[in-house]
Image (tube, rainbow, N blue to C red):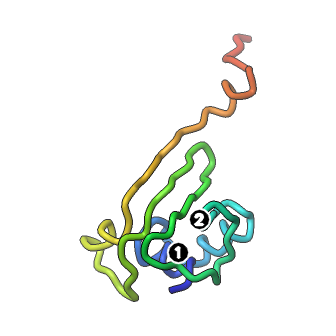
Amino acid sequence: MRLDKFLKVSRLLKRRTVAKELCDQGRVELNGRPAKASSTVSVGDLLTLHFGTKTLTVRVERVTENARKEEAGSLYTVVEETRIDEAFDKGEGYRKG
């Protein structure tokens, strides 16, 4: 199954076009490498999605063309979820006035 379709069916992202845009921006990795929207996803693959201040890594457990809302969570397992506070990572803190 195509990566962009899997991200939509699994409800990790709302729309397939959003999935394609993230892939085009290099913010989606498949098994540690930048992935295109047309990349093929298989059971056991690791997907890493880089959002604004969040990084999510999931393992593909099942691939199916359609999934109801209740079944979507069973298509993957969350391996790691990291929040990044960019201001503190850069050594900047909150500055008053």
Task: Pinpoint residue 17: horizontal percent, then vertical percent.
Answer: 61, 77
Q: How many residues crowd around disc 1 within 10 Å: few (fewer than 14), some, or many (20 or more)? A: some
> Foreground residue, 97 or 79?
79
Q: Is residue 81 above or below residue 13?
A: above
> Foreground residue, 72 or 46?
46
Residue that badge 1 annotates:
15
Q: How many residues crowd around disc 2 within 10 Å: few (fewer than 14), some, or many (20 or more)? A: some
29 relative to 70 in the view: left or right: right
Q: Is residue 42 above or below residue 60?
A: below
Label number found at residue 31: 2
37 relative to 26 in the view: left or right: left
Q: Amino acid at mark 2?
A: Asn
Q: Which element carries disc 1, helix, strand or loop?
A: loop
Residue at horizontal 56 percent and vertical 58 percent from the top:
48
Which residue is farthest left? 70
User: Residue 24's quadrant in the figure?
Assistant: bottom right
